[in-house]
Image (spheres, rainbow, N blue to C red):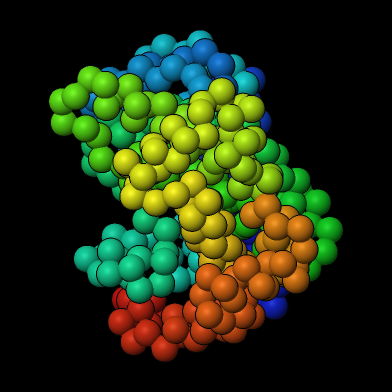
Amino acid sequence: MFVGTINRLDVNRTVFVETHYLDRFDPQYLSNDCFSIIIIKNGSITARIKNIDCHISAPAVLCLDENKTLKILSNSSSDVRIIKFNPQFLNVNMRISTIRSSHYEHLCQQHAFFQLSPFLTEDISKICIRLSKDALEKIEHSFDNLTKNLEEQKDWYWSCRARSYFIDIINILERLYHNFYIEEPYDACIKMAISSEFKVLLTYINTHLEEKQTLSSLYAMFRINKNHIENLFREFLNTTFYDYLRNRRYEEATYYLRFTELDGEQIASRIGLSSSQNFCKFFKQMSGTTPNNFRKEMIAKRKNDSELYELIHIKK
């Protein structure tokens, strides 16, 4: 078991997070007092979750909150990874009682807290998320780095780095859960095919933000005409490829600034920029302020939110 500190200045306050590599899924590694992420790379399991039978074929991720019971009916899984965590590992304000409150949706909007939608949904069919090859590789990479930082704890920033890789996993799961915010077409079969094609592009873009991406690189990868790619972005998202990529990199950067202590160089490398100077320039163009000022403003905003203070400190 590995326990992550909330931040480097408060080493005596700890938040539970635990990772496991398993040859075969074993429910004994789950518990009913935390959330769980089950990553199944090969095979399948059939499980009864809240009295509903679910067949889960790899590659897939199963997201469970502290209330969902799971009973294995059949198990041919292999190469499994498990993360058990208290949501406070994402942010100290994300107590389970706060997440369960009627105010949490408002707090998500106010402070960009993670929705944790795949964990909190009551629709059992949505707690299992199928993974593309790209999404699986990104989640595996983040899992390995999360575990490495939890195990080695080699400097003051180990917890911060661990949390940043965990944030990457949560962001992927939430964006896949919400279908990248694209509404499904109502009836047109042709549109359904185009939508599927576009989702493949979006998954690749979102799981390779740290790489240089251009219309030419997408063409080389998928052999999709550049003009057609741009048309897909206009049709489904009413934007261009480059504007979408800039906005996604900015969105990812804001999460690192809000919830970790990663410096500009580290954030730059995670969102495909070459240096901290380029990151500062990019961020100021996007937001009108510097990364450091943004981080300070967001922390102060949370501290000054009386509603959040009441939920965290009074309703313990």
| Identity of the residue drawn at 28% across and 69% down | 106
Task: Estimate the x, y position of residue 146 in percent, counting from the top left.
Answer: 67, 47
Which quarter of the picture shows residue 125? top left
User: Of 239 and 64, which appears nearest the observer?
Assistant: 239
Look at the image and tell me whether residue 252 can be seen.
no
Q: Is residue 48 left or right of residue 132?
A: left
Q: How many marks?
A: 0
Which quarter of the picture shows residue 8? bottom right
User: Of 74 and 229, which appears nearest the observer?
Assistant: 229
Toward the right, the furthest residue is 154
Toward the front, the furthest residue is 227
Look at the image and tell me whether residue 297 can be seen.
yes
Q: Is residue 159 left or right of residue 305?
A: right
| Identity of the residue drawn at 35% across and 17% down | 55
Q: Is residue 55 left or right of residue 139?
A: left
Check the picture and name the quadrant holding the C terminus. Answer: bottom left
Task: Estimate the x, y position of residue 52 in percent, counting from the top left.
Answer: 24, 25
| Identity of the residue drawn at 44% across and 49% down | 240
Task: Estimate the x, y position of residue 50 in percent, counting from the top left.
Answer: 26, 32
Location of residue 106 with respect to 31 vertically, above or below = below
| Identity of the residue drawn at 42% across and 88% down | 304
User: Of 244 and 65, which appears nearest the observer?
Assistant: 244
Q: Is residue 115 left or right of residue 82?
A: left
Task: Estimate the x, y position of residue 311 in percent, counting from the top left.
Answer: 33, 76
